[in-house]
Image (cartoon, rainbow, N blue to C red):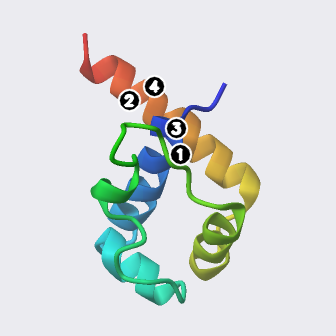
């Protein structure tokens, strides 16, 4: 099961792999520079916010990443986060 954190961590990993900031990745994808700010991942009440499918697709298309690859990145970051906690 893919979680909220998996999706955001995968987007962060994509930016890191491209050697750019999440802000630059957003701009390159035609999005607002603040789209991937950590402050936008939850609202003021602590309710989680997910990036829209449209946002994810723009990033994937810009980075030439398939949906299957995105799923693999989500899985990979989850495994690495679990390993980091041990």
Q: Marks 1 and 3, how far apart in space?
A: 5 Å
* Disc nearer the start of the sequence (2/3): 3
Look at the numbered discs 2 and 1 and tell me whether their residues touch, using CB distance below 8 Å: no
Look at the numbered discs 1 and 3 and tell me whether their residues touch, using CB distance below 8 Å: yes
Nearer to us of marks 2 and 1 is 1
Above or below for 1 versus 77: above
Local packing at callout 1 (Cα closer than 10 Å; few below 14, some 14-19, many 20+) is many
Residue position marked by numbered label 4 in the rendering: 79
Q: Position of residue 13 (x, y in %)?
A: 40, 54
Residue position marked by numbered label 2 in the rendering: 80
Q: Position of residue 27 (x, y in %)?
A: 42, 87
Residue position marked by numbered label 3 in the rendering: 4
- Tell me the number on the disc at residue 7: 1
- Tell me the number on the disc at residue 51: none
* Disc nearer the start of the sequence (1/4): 1
Q: Position of residue 81 (x, y in %)?
A: 35, 27
Q: Marks 2 and 3, how far apart in space?
A: 16 Å
């Amino acid at each position: 099961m893919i979680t909220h954190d998996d999706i955001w961590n995968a987007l962060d990993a994509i930016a890191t792999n491209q050697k750019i900031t999440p802000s630059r990745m957003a701009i390159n994808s035609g999005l607002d520079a603040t789209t991937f700010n950590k402050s936008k991942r939850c609202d003021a009440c602590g309710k989680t916010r997910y990036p829209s499918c449209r946002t994810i697709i723009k990033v994937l298309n810009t980075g030439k990443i398939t949906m299957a690859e995105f799923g693999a990145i989500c899985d990979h970051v989850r495994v690495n986060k679990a390993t980091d906690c041990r």
